[in-house]
Image (spheres, rainbow, N blue to C red):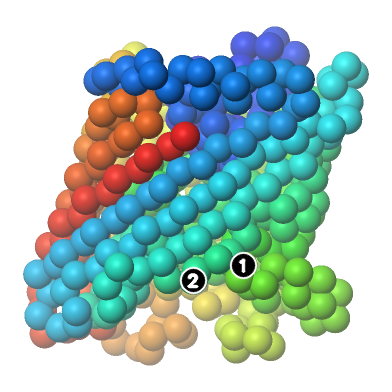
């Protein structure tokens, strides 16, 4: 379970044969490293082969994998209020360390990821949406939080990989409502096309929690977990205090069906349910909700999706959110064109009554210039920005870049 396979090759053949797809989504560190190693770019950079060979030798001898990347985004809008533009960069260092159970198949691994998120402009892209009167995040991960920790947890497999458990400081998007185009780093930028469709009040990255999941049959899986809603990724170890002393949690449960383990989350239907307590730190009320998601993989080229999310308070941005779209990738592991459309009803408990429903459209083209360098033009068209009723629509243009080593 637990691997949001961007395309069919994202899980190692050995894992598939043993029924052990990786735990997590596209951006779970093991999956991210493997995806980057299998890219089909325009150009190869052979002079870096010794470096990648060194990484492979370290992994083989010690079980330690590591990677570094730098992500950059600049966005400009036609909004008649606010800054009108924003830029940000994110440095990330991440990997895993396989420490126990290598021979038994019940592998135990330590997963880590640290980041530095910094703005180039007065506001980062994550704040640009609200700054121009759009109730939402036009760029989810590009903030100005400075140093932060996203992952610092243990993953343990049982029953030859049919069951997996994680505990520690985690990223909810790795284990909740995962689908193939959910990554804000390599797919859509707008939050309405990511985990929860902007209608789930997710805890911050680096939350202290526990989750488990397993295969019920060869086609049916389930995931459940609990985590601290008062997490702070810039001070994750404070999570021990808030988890045990405040006792305010986000709980989730998911059940899904896939045509085969090889195509989990490609040919996939799942239902995710969540409930969260009121937060004594942020003041967000308690709430609950659900997400229904369906994707299918056509001719190993097209990936259409249809997703609906509902929230009953909890501090979510949207109370109803319906997203649909398609990804097109002519060659597995290569460039991608994606288009998405979303209708969203703004949560009146978060922003007040009488606001217009928003429509969001996004088009991106991800180009792999080399295995190291990715360039992604991104276009968004926002109709009826709910917090800017004097402007009927806003157009945004973004340029996203990524260097991965």
Residue shown at 90%/19% (left/top)?
104
The residue lying toward the viewer, choosing from 243 and 47, is: 47
Q: Residues at badges 1 and 2 in contact (C-beta under 8 Å)?
A: yes
Label 1 – label 2 distance at C-alpha: 9 Å
Residue shown at 55%/37% (left/top)?
67
The residue lying toward the viewer, choosing from 259 and 338, is: 338
Numbered circle sitting on residue 145: 2
Residue 393, visible in the rendered structure:
no
Mark 2 lies on a secondary structure that is: loop
**Horizontal arrangement in the rendering, residue 146 relative to residue 163 (left or right):** left
How many numbered circles are shown? 2
Mark 1 lies on a secondary structure that is: loop
From what the image shows, is residue 160 above or below residue 396? above
Going from N to C along the chain, the mark reached first, 1 or 2, is 2
- Residue 88 is situated, as x and y percent measured from the top left of the image, at 33, 63
**Horizontal arrangement in the rendering, residue 264 relative to residue 168 (left or right):** left
Residue shown at 68%/12% (left/top)?
14
Q: Residues within 10 Å of mark 2 (few under 14, many from 20)?
A: some
Q: Residues within 10 Å of mark 1 (few under 14, many from 20)?
A: many
- Residue 328 is situated, as x and y percent measured from the top left of the image, at 27, 28
- Residue 315 is situated, as x and y percent measured from the top left of the image, at 52, 78
From what the image shows, is residue 125 above or below residue 391? above
Q: Can you tell which quarter of the image residue 1 is in?
A: top right
Per the image, the residue denoted by label 1 is 233
Q: Can you tell which quarter of the image residue 395 is in?
A: bottom left
Residue shown at 66%/83% (left/top)?
279
Residue 67, visible in the rendered structure:
yes
**Horizontal arrangement in the rendering, residue 137 relative to residue 12 (left or right):** left
Q: Can you tell which quarter of the image residue 101 is in?
A: top right
- Residue 51 is situated, as x and y percent measured from the top left of the image, at 52, 24
């Amino acid at each position: 379970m637990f691997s949001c396979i961007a395309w069919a090759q994202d899980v190692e053949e050995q894992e598939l044969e043993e029924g052990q797809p990786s735990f997590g989504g596209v951006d779970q560190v093991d999956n991210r490293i493997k995806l980057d190693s299998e890219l089909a770019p325009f150009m190869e950079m052979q002079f870096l082969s010794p470096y990648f060979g060194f990484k492979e030798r370290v992994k083989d001898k010690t079980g330690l994998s590591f990677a570094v990347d730098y992500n950059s985004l600049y966005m400009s809008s036609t909004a008649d209020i606010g800054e009108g533009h924003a830029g940000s960069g994110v440095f990330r260092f991440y990997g895993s360390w396989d420490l126990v159970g290598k021979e038994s198949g019940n592998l135990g691994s330590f997963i880590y990821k640290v980041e530095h998120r910094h703005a180039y402009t007065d506001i980062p892209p994550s704040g640009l949406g609200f700054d121009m009167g759009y109730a939402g995040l036009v760029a989810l991960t590009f903030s100005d939080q400075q140093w932060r920790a996203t992952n610092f947890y243990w993953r343990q497999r049982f029953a030859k990989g049919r069951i997996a458990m994680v505990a520690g400081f985690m990223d909810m998007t790795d284990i909740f409502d995962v689908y193939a185009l959910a990554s804000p780093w390599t797919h859509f930028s707008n939050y309405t096309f990511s985990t929860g469709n902007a209608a789930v009040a997710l805890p911050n990255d680096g939350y202290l929690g526990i989750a488990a999941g397993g295969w019920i049959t060869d086609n049916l899986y389930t995931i459940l977990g609990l985590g601290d809603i008062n997490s702070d990724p810039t001070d994750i170890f404070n999570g021990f205090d808030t988890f045990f002393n405040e006792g305010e949690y986000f709980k989730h449960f998911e059940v899904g069906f896939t045509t085969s383990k090889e195509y989990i989350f490609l040919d996939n239907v799942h239902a995710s349910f969540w409930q969260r307590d009121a937060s004594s730190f942020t003041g967000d009320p308690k709430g609950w909700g659900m997400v229904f998601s369906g994707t299918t993989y056509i001719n190993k080229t097209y990936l259409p999706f249809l997703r609906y999310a509902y929230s009953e308070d909890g501090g979510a941005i949207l109370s109803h959110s319906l997203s649909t779209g398609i990804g097109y990738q002519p060659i597995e592991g290569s460039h991608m064109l994606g288009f998405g459309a979303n209708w969203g009803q703004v949560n009146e408990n978060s922003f007040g009554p009488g606001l217009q429903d928003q429509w969001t459209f996004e088009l991106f083209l991800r180009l792999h210039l080399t295995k190291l360098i990715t360039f992604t033009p991104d276009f968004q068209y926002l109709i009826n920005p709910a917090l800017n009723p004097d402007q009927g629509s806003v157009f945004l243009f973004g340029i996203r870049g990524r260097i991965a080593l």
